[in-house]
Image (cartoon, rainbow, N blue to C red):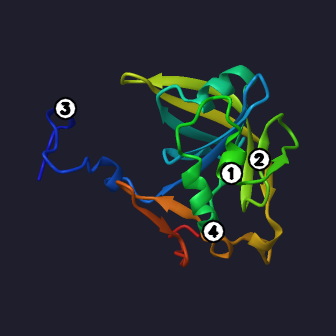
Amino acid sequence: MFYRPEDGHGLPRNPFNAIITPRPIGWISTRSGAGVSNLAPYSFFNGVAYAPPQVMFASTGTKDSITNIRETGVFCVNVVEFAMRDAMNASSETVPPETDEFAHAGVEKAACETIDCPRIKGAPAALECRLTQEVQIKGADNHVVFGEVTGIHLRDDCLKDGFFDVTAYQPLTRLGYRDYSVVREVFSLQRPDD
């Protein structure tokens, strides 16, 4: 099968997201200029640079996360573990901007160290970020937010012999459609230049 996206795919559901899998989920926490806490999952999320460490997430539509980041210049990326899948899903619901989405999703807040923004208490890892740029990309309302990581929280039980062990918390990943997966096993490959 071959199709041009502008011509349509002719399938029951768009396969694009199912092709780009698995995708890490950036559970983005922000605070509005008025002090309302927001929490939303984004599966178009990833790291983009090591030094200084930088991340990105993409949003279709100007959601509360984007509005809050524009107002404050900061956000936090919380890593989603399998055990928090229901809370993450609850935070994807469209609710009024004045809703505290931490309370709505049933997760506890913790203070960040380098930015004025809440993070999820007990998340396996959290990346405190300062906005470096927002780019509007092709499409009606597509935005990519880039941030420099200014602080990193690691949950102690996820550190094993000096390494951050993803099997300790089993990261949730996004597949296509309404499908997810979980990382429970890993293997290593030595590079030819190692």
Quadrant in the rendering for residue 36 = top right
- The kind of residue on which mark 4 rests is Ala
Q: Distance between the residues labelled 3 and 4?
A: 39 Å
Relative vertical location of residue 93 with respect to residue 107 in this rendering, above or below: above
Q: x%, y% of residue 125?
A: 73, 57
Q: Which of marks 4 and 1 is nearer the N terminus?
A: 1
* Other residues around mark 3 within 10 Å, as few (<14) / some (14–19) / many (≥20): few
The disc label shown at residue 83, or none? 4
**Which residue corresponds to the image point at 43% horizontal and 23% vertical from the top-left?**
141
- Label 3, secondary structure: give it: helix
Q: Which mark is residue 78?
A: 1
Instruction: Identify the residue at horizontal 79%, vertical 37% (top origin).
Output: 117
For this rendering, which residue is in front, 132 or 188? 132
Tag 4: Cα neighbours inside 10 Å, few (<14), some, or many (≥20)? few
Which circle's residue, 3 or 1, is located before the other in the chain? 3
Amino acid type at circle 3 is Glu
Residue under label 3, please give it: 6
